[in-house]
Amino acid sequence: MHGVLVKFNLLKKKVTVKESYSDGIASLLTQIYEESLSCLDDFSKANLKSEVPNKEYFAFENTNTNKISRPINKSLYDPDLKEWKRLMTAIEKKQVTDIPTDALQRTLYSMAISFCASIDMLKKGDKATPGAFFGKFVAFFFASQLGVQPVTHVNLMNYDDPKVSTKLPTDLIFDMGNKKQKFHVPVKTSSRERAIMLWAHQRLVDGAYGVERFMGTPVLLAETKGGSEARDVTEICLADQWRVYQLYIARLKRIYYLDLPEPYAELNNEFPPICVKPFAEFFYEWKDLMPA
Amino acid sequence: MHGVLVKFNLLKKKVTVKESYSDGIASLLTQIYEESLSCLDDFSKANLKSEVPNKEYFAFENTNTNKISRPINKSLYDPDLKEWKRLMTAIEKKQVTDIPTDALQRTLYSMAISFCASIDMLKKGDKATPGAFFGKFVAFFFASQLGVQPVTHVNLMNYDDPKVSTKLPTDLIFDMGNKKQKFHVPVKTSSRERAIMLWAHQRLVDGAYGVERFMGTPVLLAETKGGSEARDVTEICLADQWRVYQLYIARLKRIYYLDLPEPYAELNNEFPPICVKPFAEFFYEWKDLMPA
């Protein structure tokens, strides 16, 4: 088994949701990044024909089998371990906002996409491992900033028997304390035709505890899709549908991306506002999102 | 290309949603059923270890490659072309309710699962083809009974420019006429962890045109999952979560199954009622579902 899988299994098995952030996990993420880059070193890079305006992509390629990884954004990919370690130190010292947004976004993207691309090359059609990794990755950074560990359920009141509460499984929930607004953070590597689930889960927690008692701030990796035969890359965006979800299902406060699709970034300029941003901006703005 | 795929491609390419029901399609479905049974004749049957109480399953098996099909419910599977043709005649003559419910359910199940199992054996990891087929299958029967062809969108009013209406893509919509309640019919081969999408789509049409203006009556094939290595079969049911969706997102009027999971059938006995039934019952009760 490749080192990157060995290290990921450690992360998966030993780290529960309630321990999403710790120095030990920072160190494990660093090792996973090192193993991912070492894995990708064995492959060459293939240019992809980009159907996405203003974005260029490549993929890692196994020239023996013609297998390629998921598309990687050229302007965001800068696999620099020094930058990653600088980020880990800044997180420990609570100085992340000293790093410029663009550099922070590249560092976050490069680490996450390196792991996902490694799995693409090592395994066949494995979507579960990149998804599970990305959940841990986002939980780590959210917990590091908010200063609380997440849970993945809310208790629902049972009117018939108040002594028995029902657990509703949820995405990541960060409880900022008594009488404070809380964060509700769905995590997905892409949303595509399943995007409606982000709003539907927000509606559930709205229904259980009141509208926007939990602030919905999903984090997504990308919406790109690579064609392995045509060697092209497209970006699947359904902005019109997102507008309808934001009007009729629930209000999401932010949607963060590691590779932000331009058609979604534009949604903030019309009604209903849907504020879609690079994930790096979360580190700078999360305090301002909460009511004083 | 196997005959079953040739015939399915005819159905897929020539039959638009707006022509979901016709004698020609009945004849094409019959040919697809014949080809499916001829395809499955090439394979043997393997018993599966059933983890589902009170249900026994088998799978078709390629003994050279060890490949098996999806699980097939033994008590529902009765691949009898004569019964199918009897159903097609009954539909043409509007006499479906002369067929006993249990026999009708077996005929519907046997046809749909034969096609899906054929694709399992002929292709690798192809979920799109069974899904596309099942959509056509359900649309055919709904349209044959309701007497109207479906559409797959609703027009949303645009307050800023009333001359321009936005099309919201939806599942099957059957318009029963002026001032009549309409049907909203999502179709899926299984719901699993995506079940929330059924309620979320209902909420969208509720939001656009008023609560229950469109009656939500999804149709699903089964919730079983076969383990190809262990040769076992489990049924994935999330009844507690369904209850929360029915309370907090929208009200579905009926949920129809071809292989009805027992834990869902029991939901009708508690609050909030979720009426989950064999698909065959739709043919007998749809007139009673609509307000007089």
Image (tube, coloured by chain):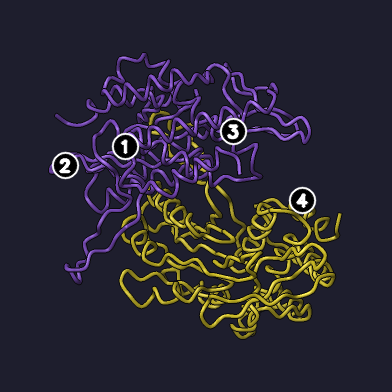
Chain colours: A purple, B yellow
Residue mark closest to the camera, 4 vs 3: 3
Residue at image position (64%, 43%) is A123
Secondary element type, mark 4: helix
Q: Name the amino acid, label 3.
A: Ala
Where does label 1 land, which residue?
Answer: A22
Secondary element type, mark 1: loop
- Chain bearing mark 2: A
Residue mark closest to the camera, 3 vs 1: 1
Instruction: Work out which quarter of the rendered image holds the C terminus of chain A and state it.
Output: top left
Q: Name the amino acid, label 1.
A: Ser
Q: Nearer the viewer, residue A220 or B258?
A: A220
Residue mark closest to the camera, 2 vs 1: 1
Callout 1 touching callout 4 (CB < 8 Å): no
Residue A117: mark:
3
Give the side of residue A44 with respect to residue B190, left or right: right
Q: Nearer the viewer, residue A189 or A27?
A: A27
Q: Residue B61 location, x and y as percent?
A: 76, 69
Do badges 4 and 3 share one subunit? no
Q: Name the amino acid, label 4.
A: Lys
